[in-house]
Amino acid sequence: AERNKDIESKNLVIEQARQELEDRAQQLSRTSMYKSEFLANMSHELRTPLNSLLILARLLAQNTEGNLTEKQVDYAEVIHSAGSDLLQLINDILDLSKVEAGKMDLRREPFHLSQLVEYLEATFGPVADERRLRFTVTLADDLPESLNSDEARIRQILRNLLSNALKFTEEGGVSLTVEHAPSTETPPTLAAAGQVLAFRVTDTGIGIPVEQLQHVFEAFQQGDGTAARRYGGTGLGLSISREVAGLLGGAIEARSVAGRGSTFTFYLPVPRPAELAAAGAASTA
Ligand code: ADP
């Protein structure tokens, strides 16, 4: 009887501790939701005045009336470019808080892979040219013609990876290849997903030291301070990209050799045509 009582009182202590932990966890998740909602609202309120500021700074910089000095035009340009950086930061924070609050909605619609590639070539070709870097896009020839996924979000991820690749590369170039992910390479979380595409962005840039590689996906994490100052950016791009990739059912992985270059691979599961047909049949049934 003595032993039973002892066990009972121990169970009581354990139960109380469990209850306390549960309450604390609930409190934390509420706080974190409030934080995300607050950030989302704030970001919205900040964007509106900033947009007016940007439009006016651009107008000033154009000096249409012709009565500004060269220096004044320079100042207007600085205001515009600092404002653009701020807008990027605000948009990034808004995106991250949306994902964290579970409020980033996806739109799955069929779109052509070739359309996505054309967009990326048109966007990044000129940037690469200007920086005298090579930029190539290669598609495997067994790819599906169209994908059923959120094209805008896929663009966002690839824009992030490609602009990083170009930003951190001084010579050589950047390549994007799209192929079916070899099954030996598919991340474990996607192993059951069936067909998985791999979008690989490879650069011959500064690379990432091993000890930093695991941290680049954390919010506000940038390479060493001097590099961050030299290259600009918010340190949010990769954490947003990884979150969004996860929402799409995919993943992003990085490999890098410091001083040699990096490869970021975005894995995207795509249903086989048969699965799509089955899903269509199920939804019309
Ligand atoms: P940002 O580029 O705005 O700083 P990201 O989240 O996109 O933020 O990247 C985080 C950090 O990861 C960068 O500051 C940089 O140190 C490192 N990084 C990302 N992509 C590359 C790359 N292709 N080559 C070298 N370093 C990279």
Image (spheres, rainbow, N blue to C red):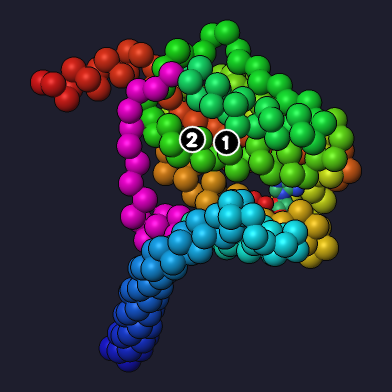
Is there CB contact under 8 Å for labels 2 and 1? yes
Which residue is at the front of the view, 39 or 274? 39
Q: Residues within 10 Å of mark 2 (few under 14, many from 20)?
A: some
| Outermost residue to the left | 285
* Residue 199 falls left or right of residue 284: right
Say above or below: 94 vs 121: below
Which residue is at the front of the view, 136 or 216? 136
Q: Is residue 84 visible?
A: no
Three-letter amino acid code at the position of disc 1: Leu
Residue 163 location (% of width, % of height): 66, 41
Which residue is at the front of the view, 115 or 251? 115
Residue at 55%, 22% in the rendered image: 117
Q: Circle 2 is placed at which residue position?
A: 154
Say above or below: 28 vs 271: below
Residue 1 location (% of width, % of height): 28, 88
Say above or below: 89 vs 130: below
Which residue is at the front of the view, 114 or 215? 114
